[in-house]
Image (cartoon, rainbow, N blue to C red):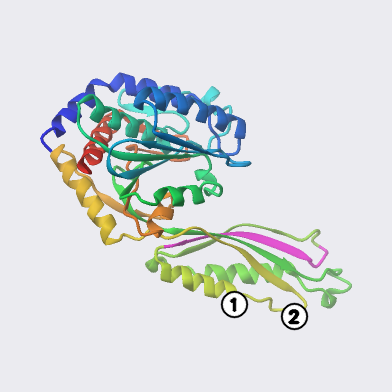
Amino acid sequence: MSDIRALRDWVGIRREEMLADLGTYVGIETPSDDKESLAAGLSWLDGWLNERLGAATSVRHVDGGVHGDIRVYDYAGEGEPVLVLCHYDTVWPRGTLAEWPFTVDGDKVTGPGVFDMKSGLVQAVWALRALEDLGLPRPALRLVLNGDEEIGSLASRPVIEEAAAGTRATLVFEASADGAVKTARKGVGLFRIEATGVESHAGLDYAKGASAVDELARTVLALHGLTDVDAGTTVNVGVVAGGTRQNVIAGSAWGEVDVRVRTAEEAARIDAAIADIRARDPRAKVTVEGGWNRPVMERSPAIGELYERARGLAERLGVTLEECSVGGASDGNFVAALGFPVLDGFGAVGDGAHARHEHISIAGMLERTALAAAVFHSFC
């Protein structure tokens, strides 16, 4: 691509405009559990996208129910569309901005959601603007915005999977991992243990009772024993509760479980082990409910080819683009599980997702915007 340096120069000139857009976007709070705030944020995005990219050829609106609504925008271009995934919800509750406003300090930008993942969408949009303003062709584009990613994409998953049909590649503008893009992600299972026992007086009628807490404890140990760090599998019972009083044999107890796996084979092993869980005491009962919130995103040959495409273009921009595998999951997991090539973590360069030190690098934002433009153009 002979125009790759022109992309970098064009993006550099738009630094202040990009920061202004990002500041406005971060200044609109969009917590995952606040439907009203999410609606306001999505309304702003509708207008901003129309201003920056022009009218989409089609816009699909999907009601998210109690969760944030979903938008699917299609933009004209060459060939089959490239899918872009960006969520607009954040983990930060309404009111966070009052004590932690959007702030620019040298190369560092902070604010709730700036890294995960509001900067990513700003970068994607300005990458497309670069191609338009420079007269460079761009592929047809399908952009999905969802407002429930941080809580599992319960409403948006089927919309994302449907949107992937007929696309040739997916770019997920989630934050990078120390600058590296993500070519593999673990699958995530979310389960709940329910233990039911028989209540009795702990002193007078101990033998008549069957402790749900005892059954829960044994189940927790069994589940933790499934962890295989070398295989990339972790099982964590992170929340437990049960019983009524210390002198009562517990009649009920429960726990919440997080499972991470690197391969489908490990997911099957965990499923089989969970299916075999039984109460030790025949008077008690233990059930495990739940399932896989996100499937495994394994590094397929197609994902490897997409990474190499981006890496080669980055090299021409004078940038070293690394890849990595991470334990966290994203909406990219859904698309990869369908067999489509996915390049994830293509968004912000910075650190601190879900933490008070969340921040991005402005130089990284400009660099990634130019690279995104080059990758989009490479499909033409």
**Which SS class for mark 2?**
loop
* Above-or-below relation of 4 to 98: below
Q: Amino acid at mark 1?
A: Asp
* Above-or-below relation of 44 to 339: above
Q: Quadrant of residue 176 in the image?
A: top left
Residue 276 has which mark?
Answer: 1
- Residue at mark 2: 282
Residue 248 has which mark?
Answer: none
Instruction: Residue 300: tell me if it is visible.
Output: yes
* Above-or-below relation of 53 to 189: above
The range drawn in magenta is 247-261
Q: Kindly report which numbered mark, 1 or 2, lies closer to the viewer in this rendering.
A: 1
Would residue 258 be counted in the magenta stretch? yes
| Residue 150 point in image, percent of width and height | 51, 44
The C terminus - image quarter: top left
Q: Residues within 10 Å of mark 1 (few under 14, many from 20)?
A: few
> CB of mark 1 within 8 Å of CB of mark 2?
no
